[in-house]
Amino acid sequence: MWRRIRAALGMGLIWALGWGVIAGGGMELLANFIPALNVVDMWIQPLAMLGFLSGAAFSIVLGIAARRKRFSELSVGRFALWGALGGTALGGLFVVSGMAGPLILIPLFPLSIASAAGTLAIARQAKEEQLPAGEPQERLR
């Protein structure tokens, strides 16, 4: 149980960093050129918080959907689908609870898909570098 909690927190932190720096920084730059994007003073913090929650939600979805699978057995498309599921479920919770409007799904959906696909690519690369040739990849737990 603690390992799964630690994995969800780690995934959340990684996604928060990516969403905050890449997406939030990009939105800050775009806001300088497109005045309509100045609706939020700082894009970095809200996107980092959403990234953390989406990454943790994705980790839970991944733990359920790919419990006995190896990274080599997983397709980028499935990972992206699970990312979309985690991000959309989180956005749906925000909308249903009244914490946010339906517009929150606009950034959550594509960022979750891209982050999930990127997560698989990074995980595959890390596994290839760590394992000696011919060693089987570890199963997700």
Image (tube, helix red, strand yellow):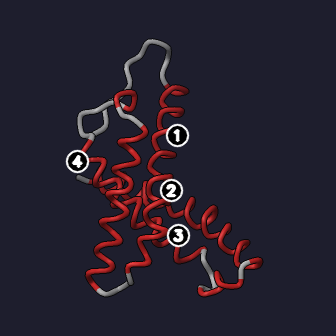
Q: Earlier in the sequence, mark 1 or mark 2?
A: 2
Q: Position of residue 14 (x, y in %)?
A: 50, 56
Q: Percent from the top left, x then y, of residue 91?
A: 35, 71
At label 4, the amino acid type is Ile
User: Marks 2 and 3, Cα distance to the nearest angstrom?
Assistant: 10 Å
Instruction: Please tell me which of labels 4 and 2 falls first in the chain.
Output: 2
The residues bearing labels 1 and 3 have C-alpha atoms spaced at a distance of 19 Å
Q: Earlier in the sequence, mark 1 or mark 4?
A: 4
Query: Looking at the picture, how far across and down is residue 53, in whole percent?
Result: 39, 67
Q: Amino acid at mark 2?
A: Ile
Q: Secondary structure at mark 4?
A: helix
Query: What distance separates the C-alpha of mark 4 from that of mark 2?
Result: 20 Å
* Disc 1 residue type (three-letter): Ile
Residue in the image at 34% along x and 53% along y: 59
Q: Which residue is mark 2?
A: 14
What residue is shown with label 3?
48
Q: Which residue is mark 4?
A: 64
CA–CA distance in space, label 3 to label 4: 24 Å
The disc placed on residue 122 is 1
